[in-house]
Amino acid sequence: MIPQAQSQRSLEERLAPKIDQGEYLLVLVLALMLWIAGFVDLFTHTSQEPQVLGLYSWPYFLFILTYSLGFVFLGLLIFPADSLTWFKRGIHFFQTNTLAGLVWFGVSASLILSMFIWERWTSFPLLETSFALLVLLFSTVILIMRPSPGEPLRPFHKGMLFLFGAVISVEAVLQILSFAGILPLPNYEGLFTSYGRVYQAEEGFTNSRMNKFGLYYPEFRLGQDSQRIFLVGDSLVQGLQVSKDELFGVLLDQQLNQNTSDDAIEVLSLGLPGYGPGLYLNTPLYPYTLEPLQPSEIVVFFHLANDFQTISGPGQPIPYFVIDSSGKINVAEQDFARRHDLQHLIIRGFEPINPVQTMASHLFLFGPVDGLIQRLTGRLTRVPMPVLNFEQTRPEQPLGAASFVFSDPPDPRAEASWAVAEAQLDEFFALTAEKGVTMRLVTIPYFPAEFYNSSPNEGWEGRLGSYDLLLPEKRLQAFAQERGIPFLGLGEYL
């Protein structure tokens, strides 16, 4: 039986202990909302081998039941009359017990890092976001709330406050400098991350958000009946050094649709970093990147100075390709793992959005953390920006690392690079033909500074000493004509 005095208390009087400690109650209510969001993600997910209720496997069903115990725990902290007292004691325990505090922040850091390593998180984006926000919420509570105001802060607590304060201050300064356009440090974490961020000020200026597919390009319209033309190539198609409105894919789209009212033609761009055709013509990527977007035409842009494989051998930053005894092209055995990691990083933008990776890509201080993850795991967690062939010029190779491809008379080393390039183009052409997609080939020429300083009679014939700057283009033209591939040589056009 409820005592009469207690039964006569008003609702305000009964809620007074909770209202007086409203900041703690608010934390728990927010935690409950996040826990519910994670549960919705789990509950609506179907196992690959459903057994329970035709939806879940037994391990997954048991995990849902275990997760449900979190509601009991949060309920005990929210609803009983003295529950907030226990919550405050818990906060005090982590603030004053060094070992417990280290365990909390260590486990929290491990959980967040797992979201960048364990691919399974991408299947539960709402759960992942909820857990990340829960970690941030309770870590902030432990750092700044004072359930016992009169008690002095312990050295551990002071150290953690100083560390987190310093990190936040440094990040804030870097963000201010980046928006002012004067920060020299680049940030490429957002490449191939849905709505990720890329910043660089080395050449041109870029401080931009990627589109839904993690590509440096405006959002794809993807009209129901549109004719879609994809531009495929490496860093010059990617165009990080110019604004998205100035990308040549955008300008071509505008030109093709200038006399139409319904944007019936859509030009899309899939520019990748400068790894050459070994990455942008990588046929295993096709089912995950291009095929779902249903292109009607694919225009391949081949850079004459950058896209030929140099005779560097395997084990380098750029995967090395070989032709086996049957004439098929494949990556060297030592580079299987690296190509596999690069493939997954590119596909990442075409998978469900990973909110934690998206948010992290906007932070400059996440770059060093990402680098640490790569060193500890031995796996790529972001697409590195390789040194381009034509950035490796020396007096003896004025066209960069692939200068031997332009040599006239021919350099014996060139045949191996030609064979690899033609095999890559052949494999991609066979795939597009099988899919009923038109493939076109366009060359991007390269004229070094010495070319413009040469005599007019020599220079505008496309020669530079013993190098024929249009030799690779002529051979690619013959290759395309032999196979019936529509071809445009921009070197000859210029």
Image (tube, rainbow, N blue to C red):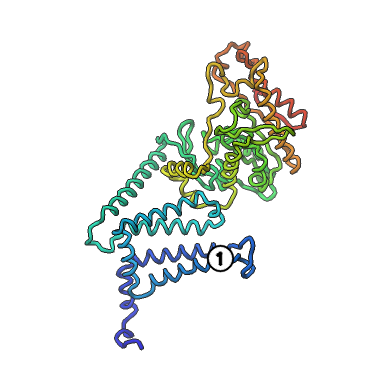
**Residue placed under numbered mark 1 in the picture:** 43
Q: Residue at x 38, y 44 (%)?
A: 171
Badge 1 element: helix
| Closer-to-camera residue (488/186) | 186
Picture coordinates of residue 310, whole percent (x, y): 60, 26
Q: Is residue 354 left or right of residue 77?
A: right
Q: Residue at x 38, y 70 (%)?
A: 77
Picture coordinates of residue 136, whole percent (x, y): 40, 56
Picture coordinates of residue 151, whole percent (x, y): 23, 61
Q: Quadrant of the C terminus?
A: top right
| Closer-to-camera residue (381/36) | 381
- Decide: few, some or many residues near mark 1? Use Cα within 10 Å; few <14, some 14-19, many ≥20: some
Q: Quadrant of residue 286?
A: top right
| Amino acid under disc 1 | Phe
Vertically, is 422 above or below 2? above
Q: Quadrant of residue 86?
A: bottom left
Q: Residue at x 61, y 32 (%)?
A: 320
Picture coordinates of residue 445, whole percent (x, y): 62, 25
Q: Quadrant of the N terminus?
A: bottom left
Q: Residue at x 53, y 21 (%)?
A: 393
Q: Is residue 49 left or right of residue 243?
A: right
Residue 255 in view: no
| Closer-to-camera residue (363/491) | 363
